[in-house]
């Protein structure tokens, strides 16, 4: 019980594999994903600050490092299923939020409950930090899908994941998004030129949509 229970539960994130049920050249755990999201967000926030935007770093680290903690209870649900409808996505989020709240109520010491409720909440919102989290989360989808396509994985889910993540990112108003589209994405596409899958065409379709 107590904080020990929380620390011990973190190991479970190492056992939850992303994109379950699909062939992958390389498996990615939720734990590894969360670590990468923090790294992406850190650089994205630096770009925002370089352009004069104030960033609440404490909030950013809290929401990026803990954004998928709830998957301990419900696992990683396939992206097509999760986004099948707005109603379904909202229902899944409600279940996840409810189970996290139940866990906090039953395992976290009273004096720390407000802190855990703040840290383990859904952090994607209209704030600068919430939008950076959204971009960072989608960036990891892009890089996971890119790595699979680069190796010749023709699973349609990875192509859709790559395309949809780009479409989502380009709709988010941030300086770091502009930087990604202008400087990072072209390098990624160039690197993927030797892939048996036409990554450039998929990218251009996503940018044009």
Image (tube, grey):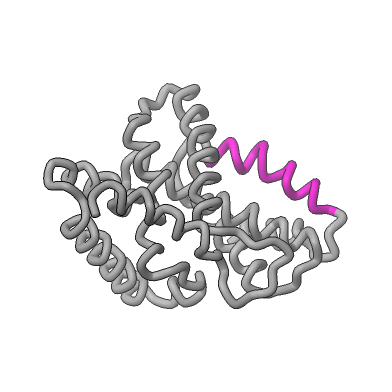
- Residue 135 lies left or right of residue 120; in this view the side is right
Of residues 110 and 63, which is closer to you in this image? 110
Predominant SS along the magenta part: helix
Of residues 177 and 76, which is closer to you in this image? 76
Tell me which residue sits at (39%, 37%) in the image.
61
- Provide residue 179's location: percent of width, then percent of height: 59, 36
Image quadrant where residue 162 sits: bottom right
Tell me which residue sits at (72%, 56%) in the image.
147
- Residue 179 lies left or right of residue 66; in this view the side is right
- Residue 198 lies left or right of residue 156; in this view the side is right
The total of numbered circles placed on residues is 0
- Provide residue 68's location: percent of width, then percent of height: 41, 56
Tell me which residue sits at (43%, 72%) in the image.
82
Image quadrant where residue 22 sits: bottom right
When the figure is inspected, residue 115 is found, relative to residue 89, above or below; the finding is above
In which quadrant will I find the N terminus? bottom left
- Provide residue 135's location: percent of width, then percent of height: 49, 47
Q: Is residue 182 magenta?
A: yes
For the magenta stretch, what is the residue range?
177-193
Of residues 104 and 23, which is closer to you in this image? 104
Q: Is residue 199 magenta?
A: no
When the figure is inspected, residue 46 is found, relative to residue 25, above or below; the finding is above
In which quadrant will I find the C terminus? bottom right
Tell me which residue sits at (23%, 50%) in the image.
2
Query: Residue placed farthest to the left in the image?
Result: 110
């Amino acid at each position: 019980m107590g904080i020990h229970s929380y620390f011990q539960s973190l190991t479970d994130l190492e056992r939850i594999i992303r994109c379950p049920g699909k062939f992958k050249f390389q498996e990615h755990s939720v734990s590894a994903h969360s670590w990468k999201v923090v790294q992406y967000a850190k650089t994205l926030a630096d770009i925002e600050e370089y352009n004069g935007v104030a960033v609440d770093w404490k909030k950013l680290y809290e929401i990026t490092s803990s954004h998928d903690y709830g998957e301990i209870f419900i696992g990683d649900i396939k992206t097509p299923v999760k986004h099948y409808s707005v109603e379904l996505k909202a229902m899944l989020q409600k279940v996840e939020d409810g189970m996290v709240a139940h866990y906090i109520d039953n395992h976290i010491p009273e004096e720390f409950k407000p802190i855990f409720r703040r840290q383990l909440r859904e952090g994607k919102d209209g704030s600068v930090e919430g939008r950076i989290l959204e971009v960072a989360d989608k960036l990891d989808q892009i890089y996971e899908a890119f790595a699979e396509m680069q190796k010749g994985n023709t699973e349609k889910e990875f192509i859709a994941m790559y395309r949809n993540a780009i479409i989502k990112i380009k709709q988010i108003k941030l300086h770091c998004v502009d930087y990604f589209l202008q400087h990072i994405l072209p390098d990624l596409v160039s690197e993927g030129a030797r892939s048996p899958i036409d990554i450039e065409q998929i990218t251009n379709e996503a940018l044009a949509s």
